[in-house]
Image (spheres, rainbow, N blue to C red):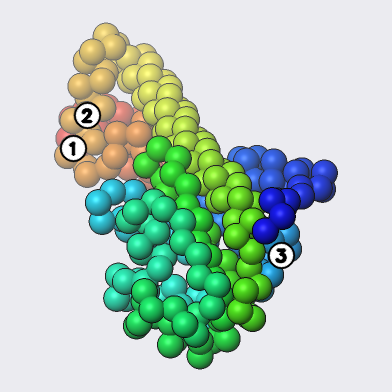
Amino acid sequence: MDGVGPQISSELAVEIARLGLIHEASETAALRRVTELAVRTVRGCAGASGIRWTAGDDPEPRDVTSTHPDLSHLIDVQCARRDGPVFDVARSETSIFCSDTLVETRWPAFTPIALQRGVRCFATTVHRTGPILMTLMMYGVVPGALDRRELGLGALLAAQGGAAVSNTRHYEDAHRTAVQLQQAVEARAVVDQAKGVLMHAMGCDAETAFNELKRISQTRHVKLTALARRIVEGSGPDGDGTGRSGLAGARNGR
């Protein structure tokens, strides 16, 4: 080994940076981009699989993507048995390297299947971002195709991919909360408008109007917001077009 590590071109640097752009990636898209970049940039890497895990004593795979169906099968086999190199990496959070699958003895159940799929060497890197664990498993088709010096680049891809997945989750959670708050504000607004209509029609105060809304909602099995919207739109409590003239009837139970 001459100590010369992988060189990162300006183009690769831009692509790695793009992994973190939330508006361009879902969790699955971020994983897929990591595996594609590994194949394009890590020397000797003919295929790759990326997995997002829930970290812990018994990590659980959540999202999986592979660059080839045969590699998806290898991950499925390991997940079904909860055993294999990728599970060892997820549990220990330590990278592994195999220069020749044919002479590998650590995973006797996995290596024959990998050989059948043409895998002659493999390496897995791992990175944790908070509760998110990201593993990147890279495969070569000839013994020694993967160079240990290239694993630093794989680790960088796993780290940036893990950060992208974590950022995407935070963004989606924040967006979901914002939508729920917006819906709550809109629902409150239409209920307030309906209260105003009832106050005018019944000559009552706001509390009485709101209690009347709740009574009609319960007796007619209509959601409060839907009932309020009908009243505001002038279609009446039953949505039958009776408009505000029907409010008196609703109050009298007709």
- Give the position of the C terminus as an image quadrant: top left
| Residue that extends furthest to the front in the rendered view of this protein | 2
| Residue that extends furthest to the bottom in the rendered view of this protein | 116
Q: Nearer the viewer, residue 124 or 12?
A: 124
Up the image or down, 56 lies above or below 71; here it is: above
| SS at badge 2 | helix
| SS at badge 3 | loop
- Give the position of the N terminus as an image quadrant: bottom right
Q: Please state if 209 lies on the left or on the right of 33 as rendered.
A: left
Q: Residues within 10 Å of mark 1 (few under 14, many from 20)?
A: few
Query: Which amino acid type is marked by label 3?
Result: Arg
Q: Which residue is mark 2?
A: 214
Residue 140 found in image quarter: bottom right
Q: Please state if 81 lies on the left or on the right of 104 as rendered.
A: left
Q: Disc number at residue 28?
A: none
Up the image or down, 206 lies above or below 163; here it is: above
